[in-house]
Image (tube, coloured by chain):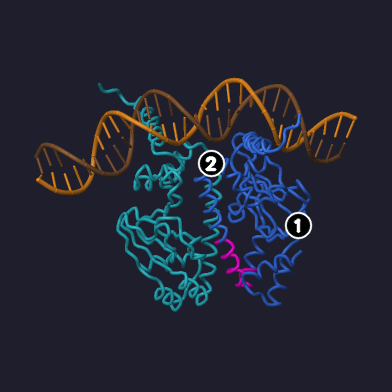
Chain colours: A cyan, B blue, C orange, D brown
Amino acid sequence: MKDNLITHINKFVKLDEHEAALICDSIGLVEVKKKKFILKADDICRANYFVSKGCMRLYFINRNGQEQITQFGLENWWITDYASFETSHPSIYYVQAIEDSELISLSKKTMEELLLKVPKLERYFRIIFQKVHTASMRRFEYQRDQTDEERYRHFVSLFPEFVQRIPQYMLASYLGFTPQFLSKIRGKRESRSKNQEPRKE
Amino acid sequence: MKDNLITHINKFVKLDEHEAALICDSIGLVEVKKKKFILKADDICRANYFVSKGCMRLYFINRNGQEQITQFGLENWWITDYASFETSHPSIYYVQAIEDSELISLSKKTMEELLLKVPKLERYFRIIFQKVHTASMRRFEYQRDQTDEERYRHFVSLFPEFVQRIPQYMLASYLGFTPQFLSKIRGKRESRSKNQEPRKE
DNA sequence: CGAAAATTTGACATGACTCAACTGGAGTGG
DNA sequence: CCACTCCAGTTGAGTCATGTCAAATTTTCG
């Protein structure tokens, strides 16, 4: 729904009717079924996507042939490979739906035009990117100051509902370790809480 | 020099005389001697800094009491703790001069006023933050796809002159490993090239 | 010149990985 | 509704990259 985007923008700048209409007329709606891709490696990334419903993931294949997730795209997040989007060079990333999702797409050309027609959007995106940068710094902090196990527990405590929505191996990939290791971490906690239950034989 | 900033902004948006003057009147100049701080942990970060000359580093103290560098600020880079800058909560970061440096400071209040008076700056900062985000993604890629040794060699090949300007322990901290380990990596390369020289006894 | 800081080196410890086998559930087709 | 396959998750053994600690050496700088 286009409304979701307009509502989101209005949290940061106040659009008038005319501006909102201009935006709605320029953007595209995309429905993606679970496991479908909107970007694959070697494609040129032609749009920036706003997730209005569902959940996406952005990953690349590392040198060992394994998927390395760098970002999840939840409701109200923008997701794309900006490197490819900006330069029109082939991407190394995949963007795939984890659930059936609804996206709003903004092609590079449209985005440039809209930024000129609706200058408030410059402010909107400035604020969004500034927030993203702040979040990256925080994530980097955790990466360097916590062990893998702590990072896992911390993530679960911050986003308990989200963790339910995705398979464990994706979380392991995002947090930067192997699914096996995640399983071992969980094993520890299980056995700890088992000790507090009456044993059944 | 204030000119450095104006020149930098003009690379992305075209300022007229009046706008340039407005900006110059609002910003502050700061000279920092090597090893001096412009931000320390528990301070509230009150400004965003543009490095017009010299080199800064941004780091925090990790749980083992060691400095963890998260960012260097070279000429024409903005550097600050945006989390503290935005929220006015105490920072966990230190920002220190690695060399005698000249900075342009922009307080939060001034930045907000300037963004209103000179809307082109919204565009300027939108572009800057977008670039920063793209760079973070790239850095993250390397972090996940290369070994520590590769990341070191890669960094040296990208920024050979910069590596000369800073002590090794800072580079180790930035890249995420210990100075001892960096020394061992270098040791390997030395012995390799020594083999190609005539031996002296 | 002397003190402090930075770097090097070696011995040893360990967290996380790889590989491989196994379990259990979900989906599919006969 | 059962048999089969496939995928996610679990578990264990062995390995390796990198860390820690400590001492020795070199460099920097007042």
Is residue B118 found inside the magenta-colored segment of the image? yes
Cα separation, mark 1 vs mark 2, equals: 35 Å
Chain letter for mark 1: B
Residue A69: percent from the left, percent from the top? 43, 49
Which residue is disc 1 drawn over? B102
Task: Name which quarter of the figure residue B171 lies in.
Answer: top right
Q: Secondary structure at mark 1?
A: strand
Q: Is residue B73 left or right of residue B142?
A: right
Q: Residue at x 44, y 63 (%)?
A: A45
Residue A102: percent from the left, percent from the top? 34, 62
On-image quarter of the C terminus of chain A: top left
Residue at the front extreme, as displayed: B198
Q: Secondary structure at mark 2?
A: loop
Q: Residue at x 37, y 70 (%)?
A: A28
Which residue is disc 2 drawn over? B147
Which sits earlier in the primary sequence, circle 1 or circle 2? 1
On-image quarter of the N terminus of chain A: bottom left
In the drawing, what numbered circle is on residue A44? none
* Marks 1 and 2 belong to one chain: yes
Q: Is residue B11 above or below residue A190?
A: below
Residue A39: percent from the left, percent from the top? 39, 60
Within 10 Å of disc 1 (Cα), the crowding (few <14, some 14-19, many 20+) is many
Is residue B193 found inside the magenta-colored segment of the image? no
Q: Which amino acid type is shown beneath numbered disc 1?
A: Glu
Q: Which amino acid type is shown beneath numbered disc 2?
A: Thr
The magenta segment: B114-130
